[in-house]
Amino acid sequence: MKKLPTKIAGDLLQNSELRALMHCLVWSIHMKPSTFETRWQLLMEEYGLQDHDWLNDMYSIRDQWVPAYFRDIPMCCLMKTTSRCESSNSSFKVNSSSANTLVQFMLCYETRIDNQRYRQRVAEFKTSSSVFMDSTDLDIEKHAFELYTHAIFTEVRKEIYKGKLFCNIVNTEDCDDVCVYYVNQLDKRNNATNTFTVKLELRNQSVSCSCNNFIRIGYLCRHIFVFTGDVLPKSLFSIESRYGVDTRPQEILEIVTECVDALRSDVGGLSSFAEQIKELKCKLLNGGPVDDEANNDNYAAVEELLGVSLDGDVTLNNPDGIRNKGRGKRRQLSRASQEGTSNSAVKPPKTPRLCRTCMKYVTGHDSRNCKKKKNTNKSGNEDEDSSSASQEST
C-alpha cells in the first residue's frame, strides 16, 4: 500500500478519494474474502483500472497480503511476518552491538529483561490504580473494567461504544440449542452496511461471531456486545441515546417495544396487552380521560386518610388572623420595674490583687496609687529639701 501512489500515474494519483477507498478496502478486518473480491472488482470498474498491470499482479497474490484472508488464523493481528525478528533486533540493539563478547551480551540481556519487568510492573500499577469512568452508562463496561487490564480495557471500551452507536440486530433465529443473531454494522467511512452472524451456544454459554475478532485479537467484538438485550438494553438504540437530543415522544414507543418484546412468547398476554392499547386509543381519540381508574384510586385514598367524603361541595374561608412568630410587641418597662431589676442584681465580689508596693492582696488600690508609695515619695522630697538648705547656709 505504500507503493500505491508511485504505481498509479496521471490524474488518479491526485485522487485522494481513490486512495482512501483502497485503504478502507484492504485494511478492513471485518470483511470476508468474498466481500473483498466483489468490492475490489467494483472499485476497479469505477476508476477504469481493470487493465492495470501492477494492481492485477497484487490481486493475483491477494491471499498473501490482504488481512481478510488471514481472519481464521488465531492471533493473526498481533504478529506479522517479520514482527518477531524486527522486535528482537530493535530491543537488543539499544543495549548491545555486534562487537560485544558473550559475557557482555549476557549482561545486556539481563538489563533488557529488567526493563521489560519494570514496564510490566508499571502496567500492573496502572491497572490497579485506575479509576473507572464510564462512557456508555452500561453495566457491562464496568464489568470489563474489573476483568481486563488497563490497556485491553481501552480497546474493549471502543468495541462497546461502537456496538452501541453503529450496530443493531436485524433478525434472530432459534435452531435447537443455538440462537443466531444477524447484526448490521454501519461503516461511516463509505456508508456501507455489513451483516455479521453471532451464534450463542445455550449448552455451554459460548458465543462466536463471523468476524472472528476474538480469534484474531483475543477480545470480544462489537457485534457480540450488541447481540442480546441482557448485555445492551433496548434504550440505547433510541434516538436520544444515539444522537444526544431530547425526544420525549420516543419514550412511548420504547415502552411499547419493551412490552412487546417481553410478551413475544406469551400469546395470551400479548392479546390482552393489545386490547388495553386499543381501549386507551379509543378514549384518547374520543376526547375522554384516559386515567379514570387512577383518579378514582386517588380519591379513595384521600377519603380513607381524612375520614370524610369528597363528593359534596367544600367551602373554604380565609383563616383567622394569627400572631406571627418572632419578638412580638415592644413594651418599655416602668421606672419602678427598672429600679427593682437593677437593685435585685447582685454584683459578684472583686478578686483581690497583689500590690507590689505594700506586698498585700487588696481590692481598693494597686501599686500605682498605693498610700505607702505616696508616703515614701513625700519623705524623700523632704530629705532633699533639708539637704539643699544646709548646703546653701554653708
Image (cartoon, rainbow, N blue to C red):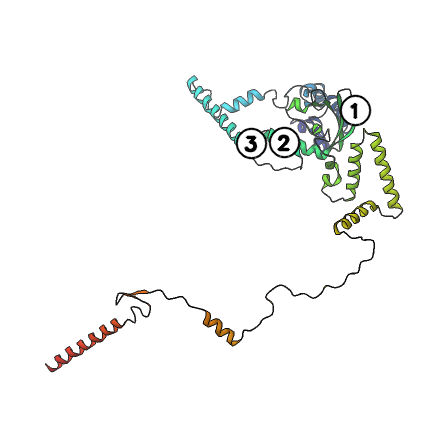
Question: Quick one: quadrant of the N terminus?
Answer: top right
Q: Which mark sits nearer the N-terminus, 3 or 2?
A: 3
- Nearest to N terminus: mark 3 or mark 1: 3
Residue located beneath label 1 in the image:
173
Going 79% across and 24% down the picture, which residue do you hit?
173
Disc 3 to disc 1, C-alpha distance: 39 Å
Amino acid carrying label 3: it is Thr
Residue 187 visible, this angle:
no
Q: Secondary structure at mark 3?
A: helix
Quadrant occupied by the C terminus: bottom left
Query: What crowding class fits label 2: few (fewer than 14 Cα within 10 Å), some (14-19), or many (20 or more)?
Result: few
- Residue 351 vertical placement versus 149 (above, below): below
- Do labels 2 and 1 touch, CB within 8 Å? no
Question: Is residue 63 visible to the viewer in this orientation of the structure?
Answer: yes
**Residue at the disc numbered 2:** 143
Q: Is residue 346 above or below residue 74?
A: below
| Residue at mark 2 to residue at mark 1: CA–CA distance | 28 Å
The extreme left residue here reads 394
Callout in the foreground (3, 2): 2
Q: Is residue 285 above or below residue 52?
A: below
Residue displayed at 79% across by 49% down: 299
Residue type indicated by callout 2: His
